[in-house]
Amino acid sequence: MSNLFKFLPSVDSVLTRLEEEGVIEGLPRTLSRDLVNGFLDVCREEIRGGIITEEKQLSSEVLFPRLTCHVRAGARPHFRRVLNGTGVVVHTNLGRSLLAPSAVEAVIEACACYSNLEFDLKTGERGSRYSHVEKIICEITGAEAALVVNNNASAVLITLETLAKGREAIVSRGQLVEIGGSFRIPDVMVKSGATLREVGATNRTHLRDYENAINEDTALLMKVHTSNFRVIGFTKEVSGGELAELGQKHGLPVYEDLGSGNLTNFSGLGLIREPTVQEVVAEGVDVVSFSGDKVLGGPQAGIIVGRKKYIDMIKKNPLNRAVRIDKMTLAALEATLRLYLDPDTARREVPTVRMITESPENLRKQAQALARTLRRELGESVSVGVREGVSRVGGGAFPEQDLKTSLVTVVPNVKVSVEELKERLLSCEPPLVARIEDDALCLDPRTLAREEYKLCVGAISQALR
């Protein structure tokens, strides 16, 4: 065993060859050296462990392909692109909504150039970053005023901290939801300094439950839209309009956390009716908050809209400095909202809306095109088929509701199981995330662009090898 160590190549000789073959072009020398040292350490462990037992296993013909893969894998950014073959449109783990091309261009310009982020071009004085989007948000939603923070959890926090700190916020027991990452609405309320006052039962809450709970310590009435789960059967909940009337009667603001709130009516797709932001504002709810990067299809943001009286109070909260949005978010959000000025344009140009509203007929054609590409490029190494299936909206929106789609099925004909193929695809470049159904790897064209089909072929080809 000890004799094998002397056959390991020197770090400098390896670096020279990597440079000659262009493997480490543009890579910092220190990183290249660290990656080579790491690979050679692996080789030493394999010698000690009896995996490498012969001199020929340390020849350049055997080592260099492995070394090249190791260096290229180590040189890749940790945060990078993946192919979404799952059919989940707003996939939280894969970055939620894709931005429209105009939003991407706006972000690039905001990053590459100076801007009027907080500069008033009319007066030449300091301006407000929120002025770039407040007017258009109000135009689209019908609200009197608006504010944007870095996500909807922040929107809930700052709204409650402003309007209910040290006092009671009344909310239905059935709406104390848990959102992604184990964050719970009651925990956010506690952090805000508001005291949670639960009313009603898990499945039924009446208007009288809210009214009976109102006392001198009550600061606001709160409604949380249960966008990420569904209670069915013997149920009852109070509408935003009913709460608004009760709030007016007692001089209390009404706040609704709409969660993944949308600006588009998707009911024509066979999905259960979800209230739009515009409808909730029209009901008379005083303050409404929702996410920017879910079914709206924009960047991560928490958008707060409502009566100017309350929005102005939230704007003045010192906490606003800690949760404010940056220039990239602002640029992407304004560009996305501009598309919503015309609903038809939004359906065409906002990727999230376009994918959700894609027709089953078009998806079948796309699946057939993807299947043809896979058969042509991969040949006899796989069996490829097309069958009916379902997609999901994702992002905590429209829970347990299916969108009709067509799935491309892939079954390896080589000595690789479907489970192993799925796992190997995560190590490809770019990684391909898929799902398994009925013993086949399934790709949903709803979340794959046509220009990504060849990348899918390349990933599967890599994985099979």
Image (cartoon, helix red, strand yellow):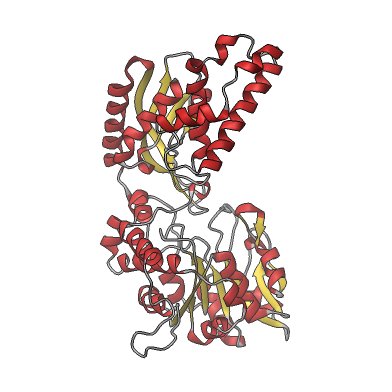
Quarter of the image containing the C terminus? top left
Q: Residue at x 61, y 8 (%)?
A: 54
Q: Nearer the viewer, residue 411 or 132?
A: 132
Q: Quadrant of residue 128?
A: bottom left
Q: Is residue 39 visible?
A: yes
Q: Nearer the viewer, residue 438 or 152?
A: 152
Q: Is residue 198 visible?
A: no
Q: Residue at x 49, y 60 (%)?
A: 260
Residue 121 locus on image (x, y percent): 34, 84
Q: Quadrant of residue 160?
A: bottom right
* Residue 14, placed above or below residue 159: above
Q: Residue at x 27, y 55 (%)?
A: 348
Q: Nearer the viewer, residue 321 or 62?
A: 62
Q: Residue at x 35, y 77 (%)?
A: 139
Instruction: State the residue lying farthest toward the bottom.
Output: 123
* Residue 202, placed above or below residue 245: above
* Residue 266, placed above or below residue 94: below
Quarter of the image containing the N terminus? top right
Residue 11 locus on image (x, y percent): 57, 29
Count up the numbered dots.
0
